[in-house]
Amino acid sequence: MSDSQPQQPSPSSRNPAGGPDRGPADGSGHRPAPGSARDPLAGPPPEATGLLLSGARLTDGRTVDVRLSGGRIQAVGTAGSLPAPALARVDLRGYLLLPAPAEPHAHGDTALTADGEGPVSYSPDEVQRRATEAALLQLGHGATAVRSHVRIGDVHGLGPMEAALQARRSLRGLTDLTTVAVPRLLTGVAGADGLAMLRDAVKMGASVIGGCPDLDPDPTGFLEGVLELAAEHGCPVDLHTDGDDPARLARLAAMAGGLRPGVTIGPCGGLSRLPLEAAARAADQLAAAGVRVTCLPQGDCAALERRGLRTAPVRLLRAAGVRVAAGSGALRDAGNPVGRGDPLEAAYLLASQGGLRAPEAYQTVSTAAREAMGLPEVRVEAGFPAELLAVRGDRIAGVLSLAYSRIVIHRGRVVARTSAVREYCDSAVAVALDLPRQGRTEPGP
């Protein structure tokens, strides 16, 4: 079996003005011949104003047609009930249609650096290239929105943030990239510069304030600085913490309780190393304060010292009422040299090792991730945003197990497609067992 890399849209698929385009995939990985259904990655024809998804399976077992228009789901009906001859069409027979996942915890500035020799380059061109490539890889996996933590300060100043914001602009219409400003220190003499730079990052366009209180000499002072600035500018907060200090978590919960639009912390693997009673008490405090947790099932990220690859106790947190999302964290950098940046892998690990049922696990990378990022809810129902992922399969559990072929829809347009081809030799046993076969539609080697 071969699994192709996510295909990047051709230049013709991009709107020169940077706005969203509207744009069927047959799931085979082959471009349609002239005169057949249009290639969704080639951009919409001038007269196209929408897209028809036909024959898709939903998680409740129904097979439906879905009509998209203006970046939203216009109608959902039984298969064949939504005739739309003027629309481009995607044949989704054999695919499960889901709300698209989102990536709530990425590090685009350091992504794809694990194989490099010497120190990581933070030149603006290199950071922009890495952030762009990382976001496209994550888009190929299905994440139509990415929150990327970007380090600022030290000798690099605001250069990495400027580069990440440029990547965001260049990706408009393909994926939504938002940035988290991550200062190193905010207290003491050195922290004064960090606080000033954090203010400048917000003015530049950073939409979230972050950082790692654990690494500051005065964690409480760090929290005070971040929360005050966030309240002043109306920004959400997204902080790195191992979560292994119950007293520090209690202080954070007490300080963050009234902040809107909210506080997220992660990856909180240290909570799993605490005695059960202490972890349960911390979970109750976080739930009462409305603090969200983003766990990283694939492992910690480079922003924290590796202290053992333990995932946050997701079942305990959820039982306490904490809203838990799951992210991918490191994408082939010092935090995880083989990180994939795949939300479905995060969900797979929570289902296979974290004790969640498959639908619950997928919810952590879709509904909960979008909520943590302040994005609108997505359902496969009329009126909701057309942020969708079609995966070959018929049930969530099977999709998380074998998520090879994927079609990604952002703002009502197919923006990425990954196709796998599985073939068995013509043996009697393969025929007798009627094994699933996704063959090539054109002669291949």
Image: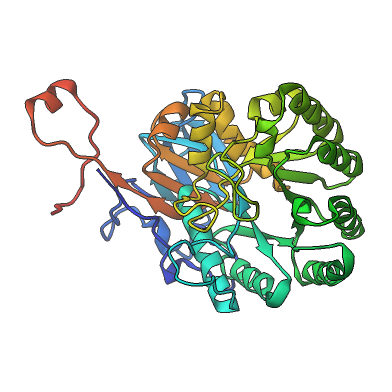
Asked whether residue 70 is in view, the answer is no
Q: Position of residue 324 (x, y in %)?
A: 68, 35
Above or below, comparing residue 240 to residue 323 in the picture: below
Is 99 or 294 nearer to us in this picture? 294
Does 283 sit left or right of 172 as displayed?
right
Specify the quadrant that holds the N terminus.
Answer: top left
Colouring: rainbow
Q: Where is residue 319 in the image (x, y as percent from the top left)?
A: 71, 22
Above or below, comparing residue 186 to residue 289 in the picture: below
Q: Position of residue 118 (x, y in %)?
A: 49, 72
Does 415 sit left or right of 323 as displayed?
left
Residue drawn at point x = 60 percent, y = 77 percent: 124
Does 317 sit left or right of 261 as displayed?
left
Is 319 or 8 nearer to us in this picture? 319
Above or below, comparing residue 314 to residue 10 in the picture: above
Is 323 or 112 nearer to us in this picture? 112
Asked whether residue 250 is in view, the answer is yes
Is 80 or 279 nearer to us in this picture? 279
Residue 91 appears in which quarter of the rendering? top left
Q: How many marks?
A: 0
Residue drawn at point x = 59 percent, y = 42 percent: 296
Does 26 sit left or right of 438 as displayed?
right
